[in-house]
Image: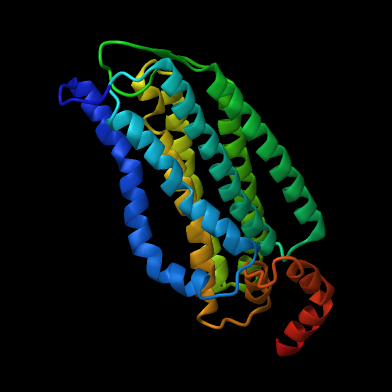
């Protein structure tokens, strides 16, 4: 059934809130498109650029699904809801997993691509991806919907709390990344009584993004198990914000490269976040790491 203009005030408020996510997404894209053209589209593409593209533009694909069934369907059938909402949940899970890899690579770059740290982060990323996809699939399959009374959209009646595992895991991963970044950058800044521009950018982004993401995820967890259309009210803003945070990390760090900073930490981290050759750059960079370190010491 196509939506009409007769909605309850509560339904209208819910729909207005759900427009926040797409609005933030479009506004941030307009703010960063110049930087994106400079730091992504004008370069030779590598692993990070592919992750950037997927993380940045998948919300433009999955968000319209939400807009369709929340704004154009008053009383969709159970079949429609069992297709639309699980599809949205799984697209979000895939997008969030990919965005998480950008945070992981950023942390690995800060640690100058330590093999030990890299192995730990890679293992954590794989486990997190499997758990997130599984728990979101279980949550999507468990959804039951209430029909009637022209409530608007898919009115969630019951759901599986297993999705909370994915939320806890997201917070744990982001906290781990933040701690690793601080542990690597703070001692150096304290001993040298100065901090490089790149370290400053990474610390600021890491702390600010974690606080904002933590708040969004916690509030979203509260809403997830409220009965009715409010259960997914913050799902879209949370998804959009994680995509924005991840892609801005790349843009902010690559912007530092324009200043031609030559300290050893910045040089190593920048190489980690460029990946000019998708398949061979990591191996080549690791092989010539002793040469780079010697060169950096000579310059110092």
Residue at left offset 23%, top offset 26%: 3
| Residue 216 in which image quadrant | top left
Residue at left offset 62%, top offset 59%: 106
* Residue 185 percent across, percent down from the top left: 63, 63
- Image label count: 0
Q: Which residue lies furthest to the bottom in this view?
A: 299
Residue at left offset 83%, top offset 77%: 290
Which residue is nearer to you in this view: 260 or 263?
260
Left or right position of 35 against 195? left
* Residue 163 percent across, percent down from the top left: 56, 25
Image quadrant where one finds the N terminus: top left
* Residue 54 percent across, percent down from the top left: 54, 53
Left or right position of 277 against 1? right
Where 19 falls versus 69 (above or below)? below
| Residue 27 in which image quadrant | bottom left
Q: Residue furthest left?
A: 5
Where 125 falls versus 148 (above or below)? below
Is residue 135 something that shows in the picture? yes
Which residue is nearer to you in this view: 65 or 214?
65
Where 275 falls versus 171 (above or below)? below
Is residue 156 something that shows in the picture? no
Left or right position of 7 against 84? left
Q: Which colour scheme is used?
A: rainbow
* Residue 245 percent across, percent down from the top left: 48, 53
Image quadrant where one finds the C terminus: bottom right
| Residue 175 in which image quadrant | top right
Which residue is nearer to you in this view: 206 or 115?
115
Residue at left offset 71%, top offset 62%: 111
């Amino acid at each position: 059934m196509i939506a009409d203009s007769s909605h309850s005030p509560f339904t209208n408020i819910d729909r207005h809130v759900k427009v926040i996510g797409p609005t933030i997404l479009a506004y941030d894209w307009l703010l960063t498109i110049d930087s994106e053209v400079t730091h992504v589209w004008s370069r030779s593409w590598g692993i990070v650029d592919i992750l950037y593209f997927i993380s940045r533009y998948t919300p433009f694909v999955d968000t319209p699904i939400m807009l369709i069934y929340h704004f154009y369907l008053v009383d969709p059938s159970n079949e429609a809801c069992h297709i639309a909402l699980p599809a949205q949940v799984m697209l979000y899970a895939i997008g969030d997993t990919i965005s998480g890899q950008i945070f992981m690579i950023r942390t690995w770059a800060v640690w100058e691509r330590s093999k030990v740290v890299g192995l730990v982060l890679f293992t954590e990323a794989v486990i997190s991806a499997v758990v997130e996809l599984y728990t979101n699939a279980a949550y999507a399959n468990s959804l039951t919907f209430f029909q009637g009374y022209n409530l608007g959209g898919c009115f969630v009646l019951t759901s599986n709390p297993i999705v909370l595992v994915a939320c806890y895991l997201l917070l744990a991963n982001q906290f781990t990344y933040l701690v690793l970044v601080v542990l690597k950058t703070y001692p150096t800044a304290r001993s040298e009584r100065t901090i490089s521009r790149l370290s400053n950018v990474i610390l600021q982004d890491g702390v600010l993004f974690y606080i904002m993401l933590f708040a969004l995820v916690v509030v979203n967890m509260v809403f997830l198990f409220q009965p009715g259309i409010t259960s997914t009210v913050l799902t879209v803003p949370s998804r959009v914000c994680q995509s924005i945070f991840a892609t801005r990390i790349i843009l902010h760090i690559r912007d530092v490269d324009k200043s031609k900073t030559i300290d050893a930490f910045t040089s190593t981290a920048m190489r980690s976040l460029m990946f000019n050759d998708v398949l061979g750059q990591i191996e080549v960079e690791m092989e010539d790491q002793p040469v780079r370190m010697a060169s950096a010491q000579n310059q110092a």
